[in-house]
Amino acid sequence: MAPGPAIVERLRQALAAASPGANRFVIHEVIPSPLEQYVPPPSGKGRVGAFPISVATVPITDTCKEVVDGLVRRTVPRETLVEARGPWLITREGLVDTLARAIAREGEITDMLSLCEAAGVRVSILPRK
């Protein structure tokens, strides 16, 4: 699913068109990468991780700087930073809930990350190897 201003509507349409028995979805925002590149989510209770939404991530390897008023304040430690590349794995219940929570901010949403932020939902990470 391509990022952009109409992503929420496209997600709603995809959800409506999905088989009623489909309880988990894989959402790619870019050209899909092989699924074996990330650690599979733990199974159980219909979730795809600790929360109904998970995303494959890679560690940040570049040096990151915090800038305030045009001046470098400090180097940000990379150990806790990841890049959320996807794919995104989400349960039907998680997608329905997230779309409902974000309805008031729909105009601001352009990708899966901004959807999750607007909805105030927590996202599990699936570290890639």
Image: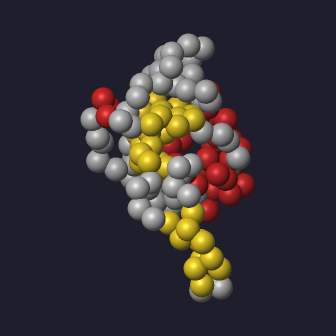
Q: Can residue 20 be seen in this view?
A: no
Q: Residue at x 64, y 51 (%)?
A: 117
Q: Residue at x 67, y 53 (%)?
A: 118
Q: Can residue 28 be seen in this view?
A: yes
Image quadrant where one finds the C terminus: top left
Where in the figure is residue 80, as x and y percent of width and height?
56, 49
Where in the figure is residue 127, as x and y percent of width and height?
45, 37
Q: Residue at x 39, y 37 (%)?
A: 128
Q: Is residue 34 left or right of residue 44?
A: left
Indicate whether 8 appears above or below 38: below
Say which quarter of the image contains residue 40.
top left
- Most foreground residue, 60 or 114: 60
Indicate whether 93 appears above or below 81: above
Indicate whether 128 appears above or below 61: above
- Most foreground residue, 69 or 26: 69
- Most foreground residue, 49 or 107: 49
Indicate whether 67 appears above or below 82: below
Where in the figure is residue 41, as x and y percent of width and height?
47, 24
- Most foreground residue, 112 or 9: 112
Where in the figure is residue 35, as x and y percent of width and height?
32, 32
